[in-house]
Image (cartoon, grey):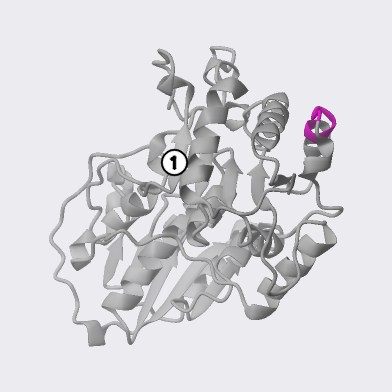
Amino acid sequence: MTPVAGGRAVRVLPPAPDSVRRILVCQLNQLGDVLLATPSLELLARAYPAAQIHLLTEKKCLPLVEGNPDLHTVWALNKKALPSLLHELAFYRRVTAVGFDLLINFQHLPRCRWVAVLSRAKIRLAPPAPWYNRWLYTACPPQRAAYVAAFKAQILAPLGISWQGERPRLFLSPAEREEGRRLLERFGLGQAAGKKPILRLITVDATHRHATRQWPGKYYAALMDAAARARPDLRFLLPCGPGEEGQVRAIRAASSLPERIVIPPAVLNLRQMAACMEHAALHLGNCSAPRHMAVALNIPSLAILGSTSAYWTFPSPEHTQVRAGDFMDMPCQSCNRNTCPHSLRCLTRLTPDLVLPVLLRHLERYSPKFEQVL
């Protein structure tokens, strides 16, 4: 996300709460962005309690909004099932035929624009748009740099709605919570029901599809080794996405204490990962969806940042980040680029010995104090 200052500040008379029957919110990707849109869903549900809130998103994002009480309907866009523009338009017509009073587009993607074209909503809001898209919307409010969930919620300003510290929301069922407990037991990380835990679990998101946001795997191995020596009660769970299994196995292989590191025998889906994370004392990792899941689950988190800005960090002390720029001059950091002309120095110069004290302080301050395994 790149903060946008401009926009068309058009006055919109907020509709009466009982006059809004249906709202469509468009947030197609990415996983983290969909989760960061849930505070806006909560704000809309609070402002218009009688309205049905619909969400248009990609099929892969469904697990992050499953069970969300603010949502009436989720329209899952499956790009593989829409091989042509005609197929896409037919899908968008089915969505907009429901009849919406209010449309919120969080993105200026072509698919979102088609929905805006076909929608007959009286109020249509979107981020600041180039001149050739502005006619699609009744207002494109200006935005200022802020935590991304708050940044998104600024689109709702013409409705008299503002972000008040709402965190992302992720809802697990009792059955999913029980599955998470059983999975951890299977991994050797659980404890019997009602017994005091003797381990502190840290979930580690050590992979990323962009090199500019991927702290080196050997650094993760060294950091976990040092943390485990300092705190013998620590254990680390390294889940991963499809195709990333080799990366996490290489990290474990580089560790001098591999018995402290657990890799699930099969790739966990997002709901299973969340159910396991609920039992963690801390979440550690790159800037990607799991760090926002930790916020939603009220698990303390520490993100290791490369090109990502600090605006992705929830503004609360139990959620923080560490960057090379915290220790040395790094003017190119927070560039938000997916490629680097400087040999990834914002990541390679952030060595494990710099991160370790930050991790241990954060763990000591914000995670429960469990008995040590000696």
Give residue 50's position: percent from left, percent from top: 33, 87
Whether residue 305 is visible: no
Between 118 and 245, the residue placed more toward the observer is 245
Q: Position of residue 98 (x, y in %)?
A: 45, 81
The image quadrant of residue 256 is: top right
Asked where in the image residue 122 lies, by quadrant, the reply is bottom left
* Residue depicted at x 33% and y 72%: 44
Q: Residues within 10 Å of mark 1 (few under 14, many from 20)?
A: some
Please tell me whether residue 102 is drawn above or below residue 286 in the rendered image: below
> Is 346 situated left or right of 263 in this image?
left
Nearer to me, 198 or 189: 198
Is residue 56 on the magenta stretch? no
Answer whether residue 354 is visible to the viewer in this image: yes
Q: Is residue 255 magenta?
A: yes
Q: Name the residue beneath numbered marker 1.
A: 320
Above or below, 200 relative to 285? below
Q: Residue at x 43, y 43 (%)?
A: 312
Going by the numbered disc 1, the residue's amino acid type is Thr
Which secondary structure lies at badge 1?
Answer: strand
Q: Residue furthest front?
A: 374
Picture quadrant of residue 234: top right
Query: With 164 as the anchor, is 255 left or right in this view?
Result: right
Which stretch appears magenta? 251-256
User: Where in the figure is residue 47, as x and y percent of width and height?
Assistant: 27, 76
Q: Quadrant of the C terminus?
A: top right
From the image, which quarter does the N terminus lie in? Answer: top left
Relative to the observer, which residue lies in front, 269 or 115? 269
